[in-house]
Image (tube, rainbow, N blue to C red):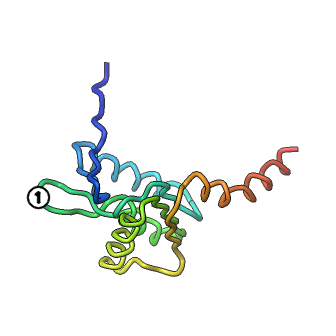
């Protein structure tokens, strides 16, 4: 039986504490982005953009994915529900010079925003299935 992967802990400040699988996750994200030609990459629960590794901060998924998206000329959409965490996300993307007009950062409930973003695509796909 496979070991249970521990959930990362999230502090009240929006910072995620890394686990032993953090770098495996980043490797998987890199491989997925490398072999696919996505025009848009969506991170529905973006967080602050940084994670804690011991006593230092390292880039989180939004920053990693922004670099991967630049290689493919894809658009990134980051959605974060907490206002304070969203502010940290904006600041951290800015520190890495990744605030870009081709990317979209949204504060709010990802469930509401995701449906709005994909509804036209779903209608298009449904028309072509008939």
For the point 57% across and 60% down, which residue is it?
Answer: 38
Q: Is residue 32 left or right of residue 3?
A: right
Q: Quadrant of the C terminus?
A: top right
Q: Position of residue 91 (x, y in %)?
A: 34, 75
How many labels, in total? 1
Q: Position of residue 40 (x, y in %)?
A: 57, 63
For the point 23% across and 44% down, which residue is it?
Answer: 19
- The answer to whether residue 114 is above or below residue 98 is above
User: Residue furthest toward the top?
Assistant: 1
- The answer to whether residue 112 is above or below residue 19 is below
Q: Is residue 3 left or right of residue 78?
A: left
What residue did someone put label 1 on?
55
- The answer to whether residue 62 is above or below residue 128 is below
Q: Quadrant of the N terminus?
A: top left
- The answer to whether residue 68 is above or below residue 91 is above
Closer-to-camera residue (30/51): 51
Q: Position of residue 86 (x, y in %)?
A: 40, 67
Q: Residues within 10 Å of mark 1 (few under 14, many from 20)?
A: few
For the point 27% across and 45% down, which residue is it?
Answer: 9
Helix, strand or loop for disc 1: loop
User: Residue furthest toward the left?
Assistant: 55
Rendered image quadrant of residue 70: bottom left
Closer-to-camera residue (99/72): 99
For the point 18% across and 55% down, which residue is it?
Answer: 53
Q: Position of residue 107 (x, y in %)?
A: 49, 65
Closer-to-camera residue (32/84): 84
Q: Is residue 119 left or right of residue 34?
A: right
């Amino acid at each position: 039986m496979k070991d249970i992967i521990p959930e990362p802990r999230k502090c009240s400040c929006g910072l995620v504490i890394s686990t032993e699988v953090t770098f495996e996750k980043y490797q998987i994200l890199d491989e997925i982005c490398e072999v696919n030609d996505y025009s848009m990459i969506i991170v529905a629960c973006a967080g602050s953009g940084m994670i804690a590794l011991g006593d230092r901060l390292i880039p989180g998924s939004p920053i990693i994915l922004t670099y991967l998206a630049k290689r493919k000329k894809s658009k990134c959409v980051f959605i974060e529900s907490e206002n304070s965490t969203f502010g940290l996300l904006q600041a951290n993307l800015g520190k890495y010079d990744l605030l870009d007009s081709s990317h979209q950062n949204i504060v709010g409930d990802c469930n509401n925003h995701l449906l709005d973003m994909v509804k036209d695509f779903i209608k298009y796909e449904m028309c072509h299935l008939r």
